Amino acid sequence: MSNIPCAVACPTDALTAPAPGITAARMGLARMTGPDTCYTINGTAQCGACYLACPVKDAAITMERRSAGGRVYFEPTVNAAHCTGCGKCEAACVTEEASIKVLPLALARQDRLGPLPRRAG
């Protein structure tokens, strides 16, 4: 439960954490909404704050090696099958307006990438 501090801290018990932990949660879906403003993607700096904040790192967010214009960089990439929508990536983003945002599931399903994969279980 330590990786779902909002549920633990809720004074009204309106939030309950799923028994298996954060990996079972499905609150929304993170999407890179501002790739042009992401410091890692646009070449301003090597960042990765969103990746480091993710409680399901290396599954929900990975840093994928890319190259463009003779430059090699690592792009934060969200895996919809593992993203819980917790929002830690959005909160950790250091750009003026977060370059990665959590979208409600209904909106994320309308995303150009197609329908979300079904979760097992």
Image: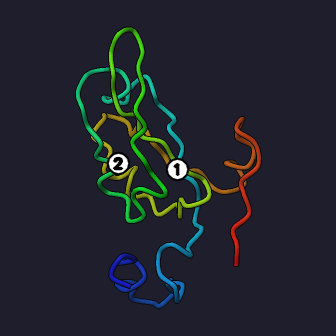
Q: Residues within 10 Å of mark 2 (few under 14, many from 20)?
A: many
SS label for mark 2: helix
| In the rendered image, the vertical position of residue 89 relative to residue 97, given as above or below | below
SS label for mark 1: strand
| In the rendered image, the vertical position of residue 109 relative to residue 82, given as above or below | above
Q: Position of residue 22 (x, y in %)?
A: 47, 75
Q: Quadrant of residue 97?
A: top left
Q: Quadrant of residue 88?
A: bottom left
Relative to residue 81, is residue 50 drawn left or right?
Answer: left
Q: Residue at x 39, y 42 (%)?
A: 63
Q: Quadrant of residue 87?
A: bottom left
Q: Residue at x 54, y 84 (%)?
A: 18
Residue under pointer 1: 30
Q: Residue at x 47, y 58 (%)?
A: 59
Marks 1 and 2: CB-CB under 8 Å? yes
Q: Position of residue 3 (x, y in %)?
A: 36, 76
Relative to residue 92, is residue 58 drawn left or right?
Answer: right
Decide which of tag 1 and tag 2 comes sooner along the chain: 1
- Label 1 vs label 2: CA separation? 10 Å
Q: Quadrant of the C terminus?
A: bottom right
Q: Position of residue 39 (x, y in %)?
A: 31, 28
Relative to residue 10, is residue 52 drawn left or right?
Answer: left
Instruction: Tell me the tag on residue 75.
Output: none
Q: Position of residue 35 (x, y in %)?
A: 46, 28
Instruction: Tell me the tag on residue 50.
Output: 2
Amino acid type at mark 1: Ala
| In the rendered image, the vertical position of residue 20 relative to residue 72, given as above or below | below
Q: Quadrant of the N terminus?
A: bottom left
Between 77 and 95, which is closer to the camera in this rendering? 77
Q: Residue at x 51, y 72 (%)?
A: 23
Between 26 and 80, which is closer to the camera in this rendering? 80
Amino acid type at mark 2: Cys
